[in-house]
Image (cartoon, helix red, strand yellow):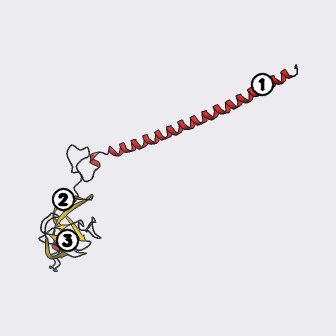
């Protein structure tokens, strides 16, 4: 009987040590699961905050950043530069229709077209707004300056006299929203 007491005490001690190790790993496992859960929660919250702040930054675009907005004296940015200053001469990059008035809804002069490669000067410019961010400018053409100043005889070339030319392609096709004229720089 005396020999059994230490065995019981030893078994008790071993079972206590084993249970404390088991409890330690169990606590460690719970702690790890809790830490991972908190980390995932924090990551989700940070992602949501970043998304909200990016949306807020996009929503705070100043009104003068919109290129289609008309200029107003109370805007922070100054008046936009004049899109075209006279005197100016151009070359037609493609065939140009001739309008009766400086408006997009004006009638075309039937049977008259300015051919590709024709040079002409401009006596008047009318800014007509924007089309998909591009300036729409109507030009009142006259004979190109180098022919007029040298008193060269008229070669019968139609440069659109008596009408208006639009510098931007407004009809669907390969020239839509592209500049139809190129400025001549001398």
Residue 12: image quadrant is: top right
Disc 3 versus disc 1: distance between alpha carbons?
A: 108 Å
Question: Which-is-in-front pick, marks 3 and 1?
Answer: 1
Toward the front, the furthest residue is: 1
Callout 1 crowding tier (Cα within 10 Å): few <14, some 14–19, many ≥20: few
The residue to which callout 2 is attached is 127
Q: Position of residue 164 (x, y in %)?
A: 15, 68
Q: CA distance from mark 1 to mark 2?
A: 97 Å
Name the residue: 77% across, 25% down. Answer: 13
Q: Is residue 62 visible?
A: yes
Residue 97 placement (x, y as % from top left): 19, 72
The label number, if any, that marks residue 79 in the structure image = none
Disc 3, SS: strand
Task: Check disc 3 and report the residue beneath it.
Answer: 120
Q: Where is residue 172 drawn, in percent x and y?
A: 26, 68
Mark seen at residue 13 = 1
Quick one: label 2 or label 3, which is nearer the N terminus? 3
Q: Nearer the viewer, residue 62 or 54?
A: 54
- CA neighbours of label 3 inside 10 A, class few (<14), some (14 to 19), many (20+): many
Q: Is residue 170 left or right of residue 12?
A: left
* 155 over 140 or under it: above or below: below
Q: Quadrant of residue 39?
A: top right
The answer to whether residue 183 of the structure is visible from this angle is no
- The residue sitting at 46% across, 39% down in the picture is 45
Q: Nearer the viewer, mark 1 or mark 2?
A: 1
3 or 127, which lies in front?
Answer: 3
Picture coordinates of residue 155 (x, y %)? 17, 80
């Amino acid at each position: 009987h005396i020999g059994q007491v230490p065995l019981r005490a030893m078994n008790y001690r071993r079972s206590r040590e084993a249970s404390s190790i088991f409890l330690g790993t169990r606590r460690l496992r719970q702690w790890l699961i809790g830490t991972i859960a908190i980390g995932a929660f924090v990551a989700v919250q940070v992602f949501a905050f970043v998304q909200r702040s990016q949306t807020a930054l996009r929503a705070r675009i100043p009104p003068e950043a919109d290129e289609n907005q008309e200029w107003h004296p109370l805007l922070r940015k100054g008046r936009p530069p004049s899109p075209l200053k006279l005197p100016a001469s151009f070359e037609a990059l493609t065939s140009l229709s001739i309008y009766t008035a400086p408006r997009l809804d004006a009638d075309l002069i039937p049977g008259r077209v300015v051919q590709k490669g024709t040079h002409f000067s401009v006596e008047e410019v009318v800014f007509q707004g924007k089309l998909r961010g591009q300036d729409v400018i109507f030009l009142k053409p006259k004979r190109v300056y180098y022919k007029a100043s040298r008193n060269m005889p008229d070669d019968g070339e139609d440069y659109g006299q008596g009408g208006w030319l639009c510098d931007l392609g407004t009809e669907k096709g390969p020239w839509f929203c592209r500049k139809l004229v190129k400025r001549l720089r001398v």
